[in-house]
Image (tube, coloured by chain):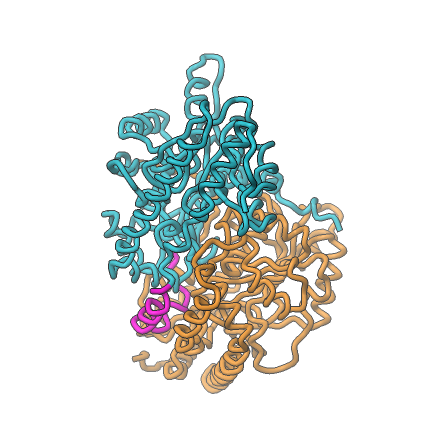
Chain colours: A orange, B cyan
């Protein structure tokens, strides 16, 4: 039976995540994988979970198993509101930060609308924008197009940005850059979707004000429990103006009625008991070491002509290789010899920048880091090196 | 700041659920509520949860807290495939059955498309169809329109139906009705979305074949853990043809990457250990008693001219009152005197049938059932009766 005639007009724009497909197709457990964006499993509070579950069920009885409010359970909304110093009415709990991106796009974008973003762009956001047939345009490109008298580009609905420890680039926007972004948003009269899953994972340097703090009236700030607690809980939140949240609330009701309830109680208890902050200290220490190790290995092995970002937090480094290196074509060779990464061009809407790659340092087996980087360096410079075991 | 200019064209079609808004606005804990569709909290395996959690974490380590596969964890996909006798490749786990409805609609419907359904229709489905600007048309209406030579109604994409213990009507389709529906679907060449959250809650009578069993090539069958395990887990599944599931899979990746993982491990363990079936026996016994009690109270108190369905399963009864009774207008009076229900007209796309109401018998406090029904009967017949305490 041919099902093509049944599909909505959005379906041809659905993209599978190349990263998720890598994970689906290949058993990466024997590979040195710099590919995913997974947190290190040893940062998860597995040992605390049974007692945490027992405590939550004793305290709240059957509520964690029942339906909950669409906004999120009051206990979690209040904890988030306190932690980020906003009124509870400006908080919406989401079933993952990816749902946050999806619901914002659904509420704001029609087919053909422009979303502004700075290349390279987070894959999950690109997938979501594409699935609603939005056109993703670089901010600089848009501004230069808009300045040309002959050309009238469409009006953008929002600017999407990960200001802290960007996925994939690892970059953090300076205060000046954030202020400039807000100025542009106000001048264009567009909203800002500030995607902020890594903000609490800072290993060096000083925190910079969030964009929401600079422009609360036009910012939807997306937070996530995936990198600070457990991605398996699929919990995030949106902080934003109440009028916008009201539309997001109604949309969220259609999407899944309410976020998973037991998960919310566990997260609320984990935060309010102080366990989250204690766990964060350990996580940050572990990730700082991994970042430093990765940077020193790159310094040790990479040939001249290779550069990389030195992220102050988050999970990723971004490598720029000599122009003749094609990371898409190099990928199969690397995987066959035991190393996985994500080619940088996947994060560009036009598939350009084939001499770049994203390296994750949180999830990779620490013992494999050195042979992995050495192998990548050898592939880049064309020299001989043994396979990863 | 005026945000209206930012919204997508779908937003004006977003509807809030009147049922969820009732729960949001009023503290129903002191009320005799026949309103919600909540399962009885005493059917939840709260006592088993801490041991279940400990077992799952011991068995699977950090996996329940990590990201999972978009399809669902293999352990749960396999358990569902075995339980419903289908290949694993025909299973997609969803973050609630509401997400199942949403993702099917998103993959199949463009604005203006027709969805066929039989009035009265489940509110969550109406909300989802409306949010994509689909036009919901009754099957009979469509067929009679299509038969008229002058009129050419648009082509429908799918038929939406709850064949077992319908929400809200409580009705179950006979085998002949299902076969007729399949015949119509094949003749019109449309898909069928078979929403089946209550199927395992049968209190009397014999199971009828699912529509998926009659027409697997064109049916998307939606299942749910909400009524047989715990709605707070937000887990459901879709069984359907692989080609359709591939599009749903890709869409699901944009929606939230993967269903909540810990929840899936708990559900898989709960089923495969036999605990689900043991719990179902108890749940079915309890609900059968509640249904029988509700029916006998209606027989005892309702004046002549009132009729109701006698459901063989599920959570709902449907009342048809004398034509002069307006359940929308009666609602505030009933609530002020301590009884909540859902007016039947909310389930009609045209707001008609204002002399009907939906009564839930699973969640209402058993001690309040009798005074609640007595009060409703008095309001219907205009006689005096004391308020609920």
Pinpoint residue A347: horizontal percent, then vertical percent.
51, 61
Relative to B108, is A218 above or below?
below
Question: In percent of the image, x 42 and y 57: which residue is there?
Answer: B233
Relative to A70, is B317 above or below?
above
Total marks placed:
0
Pinpoint residue A338: horizontal percent, then vertical percent.
33, 74
* Residue nearest the observer in this picture, B132 or B124: B124
Quick check: can you spot residue A320? no
Pinpoint residue A119: horizontal percent, then vertical percent.
58, 62
**Given the current orientation, which residue lies at the most extreme top position?**
B149
Question: In percent of the image, x 57 and y 45: which residue is there?
Answer: B22
Pinpoint residue A98: horizontal percent, then vertical percent.
51, 58
Question: In percent of the image, x 45 and y 52: which residue is there?
Answer: A15
* Residue nearest the observer in this picture, B295 or A228: B295
**Residue A306 magenta-drawn?**
no
Over which residues does the magenta segment extend?
Answer: B47-70
Quarter of the image for the C terminus of chain A: give it: bottom left
Relative to A328, is B80 above or below?
above
**Residue B67 magenta-drawn?**
yes
Main structural element of the magenta stretch: helix, strand or loop?
Answer: helix
Quick check: can you spot residue B98? yes
* Residue nearest the observer in this picture, A304 or B184: B184
Seen in the image, is B315 located left or right of residue B348?
left
Question: In percent of the image, x 32 and y 37: which residue is there?
Answer: B312
Quarter of the image for the N terminus of chain A: give it: top left
Seen in the image, is A19 located left or right of residue A350?
left
């Amino acid at each position: 039976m041919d099902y093509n005639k049944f599909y909505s007009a959005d379906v041809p724009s659905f993209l599978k995540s190349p990263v998720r497909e890598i994970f689906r197709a290949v058993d990466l457990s024997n590979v040195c994988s710099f590919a995913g964006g997974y947190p290190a499993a040893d940062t998860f509070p597995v040992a605390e979970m049974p007692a945490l579950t027992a405590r939550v069920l004793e305290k709240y009885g059957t509520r964690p198993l029942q339906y909950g409010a669409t906004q999120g359970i009051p206990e979690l909304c209040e904890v988030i509101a306190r932690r980020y110093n906003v009124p509870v009415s400006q908080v919406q709990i989401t079933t993952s930060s990816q749902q946050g991106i999806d619901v914002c796009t659904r509420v704001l974008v029609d087919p053909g609308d422009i979303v502004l973003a700075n290349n390279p762009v987070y894959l999950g956001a690109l997938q979501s924008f594409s699935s609603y047939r939005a056109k993703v345009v670089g901010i600089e490109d848009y501004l230069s197009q808009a300045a040309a008298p002959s050309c009238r580009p469409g009006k953008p609905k929002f600017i999407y940005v990960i200001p802290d420890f960007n996925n994939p680039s690892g970059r953090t926007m300076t205060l000046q850059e954030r202020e400039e972004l807000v100025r542009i948003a106000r001048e264009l009269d567009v909203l800002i979707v500030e995607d902020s899953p890594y903000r609490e994972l800072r290993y060096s340097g000083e925190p910079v004000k969030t964009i929401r703090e600079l422009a609360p009236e036009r910012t939807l700030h997306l937070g996530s429990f995936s990198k600070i607690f457990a991605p398996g809980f699929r919990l995030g939140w949106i902080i934003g103006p109440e009028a916008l949240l009201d539309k997001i609330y109604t949309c969220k009701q259609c999407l899944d009625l309410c976020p998973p309830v037991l998960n919310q109680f566990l997260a609320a208890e984990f935060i309010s008991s102080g366990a989250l902050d204690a766990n964060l200290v350990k996580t940050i220490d572990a990730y700082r070491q991994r970042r430093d190790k990765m940077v020193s290995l790159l310094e040790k092995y990479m040939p001249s002509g290779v550069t990389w970002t030195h992220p102050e937090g988050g999970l990723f480094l971004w490598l720029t290789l000599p122009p003749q290196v094609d990371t898409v074509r190099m990928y199969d060779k690397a995987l066959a010899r035991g190393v996985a990464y994500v080619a940088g061009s996947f994060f560009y809407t036009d598939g350009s920048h084939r001499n770049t790659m994203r390296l994750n340092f949180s999830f990779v087996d620490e013992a494999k880091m050195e042979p992995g980087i050495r192998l990548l360096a050898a592939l880049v410079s064309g020299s001989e090196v043994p396979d990863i075991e």
